[in-house]
Image (cartoon, rainbow, N blue to C red):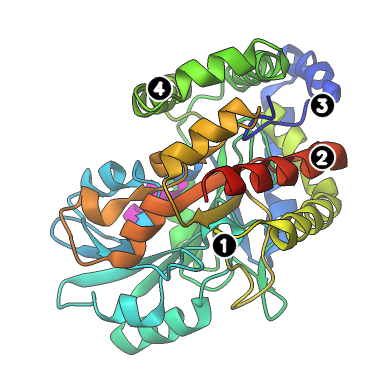
Amino acid sequence: MIPRRRIRLEWADLADALRTPWVSADAAADQVSAFERAFADAIGAPHAIATASGRDALGLILDGLGLGEGDELVIPAYTLGELVPLIRARGIVPVPADVDPASFNMTVASVAARIGPRTRAIFVVHLLGAPCDIRGICALADAHGLAVVEDCAHAFGASIDGRPAGSFGSAALFSLEATKAVAAFGGGVLVTADAALAAAARARLAGRERREWLPVRKMLLKFAEEIAVRSPAYAIAARLMFSARSAGGFDRLYRQAHDRVRGKPLAFSAFQARLGLRKLARVTARQKRLNAQWEALARDLPARFVAQRRSDFGRPAFYNFVARFDGDIGALRAAAQRHGLDLGIGGEVMDDTAAMLGFADCPGAAGAAAQAVLLPLYDGLSEARLRRTVAVLRRIAEELA
């Protein structure tokens, strides 16, 4: 079975974990500061602040911008649904703007249609590494006196006219989870040019406890998960976990398990900082390799599959390979499993946040949720497996014609 997603095992990460108990508090603070400086340099921003997660960074940004009870925040109608409770917990009202069905990103027109008298900010996502029309959205925001928050969880390495994604809005957030470009087994980064917002975020983080072994534990759990995915038994497990009956429930349980591992927000660890610095040093080569594989897979897709359009407004970054399938995606997955190919569909790709919020006027999001399919493409995927993936997709397309 070719899994839909895998992480790259770095045995140096395990060796580095052994250093963790002997790192002093001062040394840990220095290592985290070094990572923050390197990250800020990569984005071209004066402030980069390491946080417990990308969601933690978003919360700090919303608080730093002063958004609160009754304020409206325009969000994409197709994105990670777990952000909605985080926004609502602050009394902020999320208002979904529809997405372009080809790129899965918000447009200037869809955002403009949602701006009202209570709108305070626009939450922009460069979804799946594809830059959105951030220049146009920022111009719209300036005309209405609104803040712009960039979600770059998928988009480290993306750029618009040579300028990095994450350097356009009032602030940006990045994720450092295991599948991300700069993978530190958890954590996030808040990036901003606003000195006051940066100072407020640092003040909120100042009292947090730093517990070095928690990210190490998360890494070990991820390694165990990865070993399971590589075993022959995964083919049987995938058929059970991702059947039409059980896929939705398993996805919810998986997300809840990750939430429990996160626990309460802690200070970014020295272990994560060291991992982050190593990944930053390799990220350009990684992006070049994976973007080339993305293009190759997009060229070879059979009829009825249409790859996400990624390059309308800038140079994309690799995150995942997602395509739209014109047909029954449930039947597609069942056929793929029979041929040894694991796919993600529906809410396993992204969420229709418009539907979650009770809006029925976002056809782009509804279409994406109904047709999006996550295909296997990840760091470490061999050329032989890439060719096999294409061959299986062609066979399935013929079977389902």
Q: Residue at x 86, y 42 (%)?
A: 383
Dot 4 or dot 1, earlier in sequence? 4
Rounded to the nearest whole Å, what is the CA distance between mark 3 and mark 2?
A: 11 Å
The residue pinned by badge 1 equals 308
Do the residues under discs 3 and 2 have CB atoms within 8 angstroms?
no
The residue depicted at 37 percent of the width and 51 percent of the height is: 370
Residue displayed at 59% across by 77% down: 312
Task: Check disc 2 and report the residue beneath it.
Answer: 278
Q: Are marks 3 and 1 in contact (CB under 8 Å)?
A: no
Mark closest to the chain's N terminus, 3 or 1: 3
Nearer the N terminus, badge 1 or badge 2? 2
The amino acid type of the residue labelled 3 equals Glu
Per the rendered image, the range of residues in magenta is 57-63
- Which callout, 1 or 2, points to the residue nearer the camera? 1
Give me the C-alpha separation between circle 1 and circle 2. Answer: 30 Å
Q: Which mark is residue 250?
A: 4
Cα separation between marks 2 and 4: 33 Å
Residue 97 is at least partly visible in this image: no
Q: Amino acid at mark 2?
A: Arg
- Dot 2 or dot 4: first in sequence order is 4
Which residue is label 3 attached to?
A: 10
